[in-house]
Amino acid sequence: MRILVVDDEPYLTDLLNKALKEEGYSVDIAQNGIDGMECAKMNVYDVIILDIMLPEIDGIQILKNLRNMNINTPILMLTAKDALDDKVKGLDTGADDYMTKPFELSELTARIRALLRREQPSKSPILKIADLEVNTLTHDVRRGGKIITLTSKEYSLLEYMMRNSGRVLTRSQIVDHVWGYEFDGLSNIIDVYIRYLRKKIDDNFDIKLIQTIRGSGYCLKETQL
């Protein structure tokens, strides 16, 4: 899952970048309104964390612009302001949630998970295909009832594929959502991690779930394409 953080406090953005990556998210950081607006327009995010008080363009205007462009990514407003009218204005403009600084990281990550669940047809935190199950709250992964241990990046890749099961995901889509801007385009990292996942969730099972679509990308699907 890919998250955009738009905030002009370096200490906070560094903290969020580290904390969210430890949770398995791919994170992009913008430290002013113009950069934040451009990132949100140019890329597809699963959640945007948006401060109100920003240089260049404030968060409310960014929010308004995105909604006018029919960009409906879940947006969590993050601000030092705690006045009721600021919260009302943000929510009325199209924000999905609101947090006031200072805040607990555990609450922020819980709200992000809630926003991600809200976007799913089912509210259940369990993603399932065939006998493979992923608990998006605990990050537990099981196949055929057997616990499978994944690294943080392996989990991020699997969750992204599970949320898009049946769809062919291109390399660029996988890069954007799992690695973000930190990715070195000359690397074979995607192939490496697909091999890691296949070894853990496919090798010991008759039904293979990770499909290679030649010339296109990869797909998580119960039957061979």
Image (cartoon, rainbow, N blue to C red):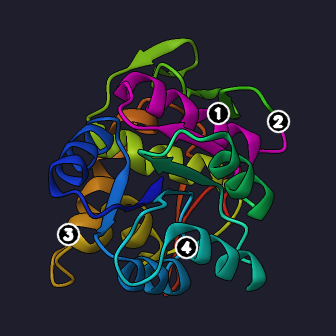
**Which residue is painted at 32% across and 42% down in the image?**
20
x and y, in percent, of residue 200 in the image: 35, 34
x and y, in percent, of residue 174 in the image: 43, 68
Which secondary structure lies at badge 4? loop
Which secondary structure lies at badge 2? loop
- Asked if residue 155 is among those painted magenta in the image, a careful observer would answer no
Q: CA distance from mark 4 to mark 2?
A: 21 Å
What amino acid is at disc 2?
Ser
Q: CA distance from mark 2 to mark 1?
A: 12 Å
Label 1 neighbour load within 10 Å: few <14, some 14-19, many 20+: some
Q: CA distance from mark 1 to mark 4?
A: 19 Å
> What residue does disc 2 label?
122
State the extent of the magenta-drawn residues as a range. Answer: 95-122
x and y, in percent, of residue 205 in the image: 51, 31
> What residue does disc 3 label?
182
Q: Earlier in the sequence, mark 4 or mark 2?
A: 4
What amino acid is at disc 4?
Val
> What residue does disc 1 label?
114
Q: Earlier in the sequence, mark 2 or mark 1?
A: 1
What amino acid is at disc 1?
Ala
**Which residue is painted at 37% across and 24% down in the image?**
104
Q: On the rendered structure, is 76 left or right of 128?
A: left
Which labelled disc corresponds to residue 44?
Answer: 4
